[in-house]
Image (cartoon, grey):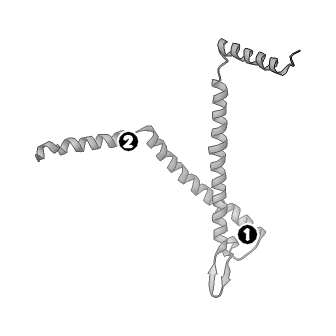
Amino acid sequence: MDLKSLAPTKQALSLIEGFKAFAFKGNVIDLAVGVIIGGAFGKLVSSMVDNILMPVVGVIMPGQKGYEGWVAVVGDKKIPYGKFLGDTVNFLIVAMALYLFVVKLIGWITAYHKEETAKPPTKEEALLTEIRDLLKSQKSTPSP
């Protein structure tokens, strides 16, 4: 085995070029931007739940330290279910926002583009449709 045939410099440069091609593709950059925006959105929702929604719940259902003070005591152990309730509300808001964005908004956009790109039928398609309709009407009328 000849060490010169391995060409480590060539392999290293090939690895770097392959990484550049992967890392700077549009999809990878879009994914990175999406992850960063998603993290910021998650912090925003957490802040809304912790600082607005759950304190309102705490006012409606008073307890010690608002919802954070809601604990179940089993023996000498405390189970802070109020914090779990806050995290559950946080999850539901994020899930609803994702549903509205992914399913509804993108669905509306794709439906709009489908309507926009729908082409009128060609002359052949129109003629075939007319023939089909005539054949269906002949089948539905009783013969004498």
Question: Pointer 1 and pointer 2: residues touching (CB < 8 Å)?
Answer: no
Badge count: 2
Residue 13: percent from left, percent from top: 24, 41
Residue at the limit of the structure toward the right, as seen here: 144
Please give the name of the residue rendered at 78% of the width and 68% of the height, measured from the top-left corner.
Answer: 60
Q: Which mark is residue 29?
A: none
Which residue in the structure is indicated by mark 2?
Answer: 22
Which residue in the structure is indicated by mark 1?
Answer: 58
How many residues crowd around disc 2 within 10 Å: few (fewer than 14), some, or many (20 or more)?
few
Query: Foreground mark, 1 or 2?
Result: 2
Seen in the picture, residue 60 relative to 112 is either above or below; the reply is below
Seen in the picture, residue 40 relative to 117 is either above or below; the reply is below
Please give the name of the residue rendered at 67% of the width and 83% of the height, measured from the top-left corner.
Answer: 73
Give the alpha-carbon distance from disc 1 to disc 2, as whole Å. 49 Å
Secondary structure under the numbered disc 1 in the rendered image: helix
Q: Residue 58 lies in what quarter of the image?
A: bottom right
Q: Residue 15 lies in what quarter of the image?
A: top left
Amino acid type of the residue tagged 1 in the rendering: Gly
Quick one: label 1 or label 2, which is nearer the N terminus? 2
Q: Is residue 58 left or right of residue 83?
A: right
Amino acid type of the residue tagged 2 in the rendering: Phe
Residue 19: percent from left, percent from top: 33, 43
Nearest the camera: 16 or 45?
Answer: 16
Please give the name of the residue rendered at 65% of the width and 44% of the height, measured from the top-left corner.
Answer: 103
Please give the name of the residue rendered at 69% of the width and 71% of the height, measured from the top-left corner.
Answer: 67
Nearest the camera: 42 or 137?
Answer: 137
The C terminus, quarter of image: top right
Residue 21: percent from left, percent from top: 35, 39
Secondary structure under the numbered disc 2 in the rendered image: helix
How many residues crowd around disc 1 within 10 Å: few (fewer than 14), some, or many (20 or more)?
some
Q: Residue 54 lies in what quarter of the image?
A: bottom right
Residue 106: percent from left, percent from top: 63, 39
